[in-house]
């Protein structure tokens, strides 16, 4: 089976399968093709298709959509997928290599995963070397309980000061944390490997809005990536669960794709 290849230039814009939730991974590939995306980021979940490299390769070929990234099942809601923490990372990297993706997105360890967190930076570097896949740690945000910050991640929700070689930047998470994505992306330089394009506000909710509906400087950040000859992938991760009318989900995702391409200089 011959899989489609991503174009090396300009910066590719992928559709995250999380953006079509609660629809299926199959729907994500079909929608990516219909709307003209450059590929798909597959979030590994309880959905069996998302865990099966053979099925994913079949969808990639059928819809002419390369798989540009794998999101490891490191969310709170996917703790039961693929067992132990390091097994999740290694299986995600192995699947990425098998389907032709170059990046695996991971969340930092949760506070209760102290053993996993202890050598996290060294561990992801080992997996990167073993599989030849970038393991890009995503920026998260502080959890608050009754108005006070609770320590949810180890060593921290912010990957910037940590010794990670590769980072994924999410605009919605940055909004919750009160961070300026434009400035942080500029500061990350070559460590920035992957972007989750969305938007948000500082109201404490992980909103994953269509860019322009929140407070982040999404356009300026994308323009910076364009002007700096960045070689990563921009993956659209917009929540469409509130879509109600016929075609509304597609409208939001088409609008976000248009926004990305306009600011990336496509």
Image: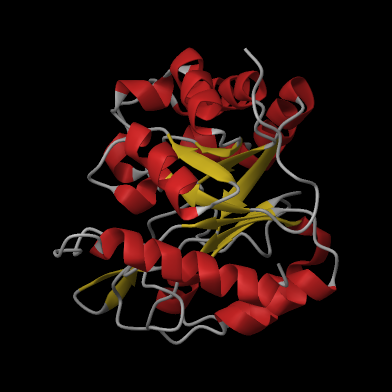
Q: Is residue 22 above or below residue 249?
A: above
Q: Is residue 66 left or right of residue 28?
A: right
Percent x, y of residue 163: 73, 52
Question: Going by the picture, which residue comes out furthest to the left?
Answer: 244
Q: Which image quarter is the N terminus in?
A: top right
Instruction: Identify the residue shown where x is 41% and y is 22%.
Output: 51
Q: Is residue 44 left or right of residue 217?
A: left
Q: Nearer the viewer, residue 152 or 31?
A: 31
Q: Quadrant of residue 201?
A: bottom left
Percent x, y of residue 238: 39, 62
Percent x, y of residue 258: 53, 70
**Is residue 141 visible in this depiction of the protein?**
no
Instruction: Identify the residue shown where x is 67% and y is 53%.
Output: 12
Instruction: Identify the residue shown where x is 46% and y is 76%.
Output: 211
Q: Quadrant of residue 175?
A: bottom left
Q: Which image quarter is the C terminus in?
A: bottom right
Q: Is residue 194 left or right of residue 52?
A: right
């Amino acid at each position: 089976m011959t899989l489609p290849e991503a174009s090396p230039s300009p910066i590719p814009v992928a559709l995250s399968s999380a953006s079509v939730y609660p629809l299926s991974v199959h729907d994500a590939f079909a929608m990516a093709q219909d709307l003209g995306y450059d590929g798909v980021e597959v979030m590994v979940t309880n959905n069996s298709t998302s865990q099966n490299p053979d099925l994913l390769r079949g969808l990639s070929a059928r819809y002419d959509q390369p798989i540009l990234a794998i999101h490891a099942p490191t969310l709170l809601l996917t703790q039961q997928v693929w067992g132990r923490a390091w097994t999740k990372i290694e299986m995600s990297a192995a699947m990425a290599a098998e389907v032709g993706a170059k990046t695996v997105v991971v969340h930092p360890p949760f506070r209760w995963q102290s053993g996993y967190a202890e050598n996290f930076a060294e561990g992801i570097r080992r997996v990167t070397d073993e599989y030849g896949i970038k393991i890009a740690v995503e920026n998260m945000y502080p959890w608050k309980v009754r108005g006070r910050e609770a320590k949810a991640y180890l060593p921290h929700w912010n990957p910037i000061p940590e010794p990670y070689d590769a980072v994924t930047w999410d605009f919605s998470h940055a909004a919750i944390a009160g961070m300026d994505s434009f400035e942080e992306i500029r500061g990350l330089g070559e460590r920035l490997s992957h972007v989750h394009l969305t938007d948000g506000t500082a109201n404490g909710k992980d909103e994953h809005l269509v860019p322009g509906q929140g407070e982040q400087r999404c356009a300026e950040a994308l323009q910076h990536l364009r002007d700096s000859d960045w070689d990563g992938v921009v993956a659209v991760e917009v929540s469409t669960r509130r879509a109600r009318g016929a075609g509304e989900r597609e409208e939001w995702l088409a609008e976000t794709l248009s926004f990305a391409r306009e600011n990336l200089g496509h």
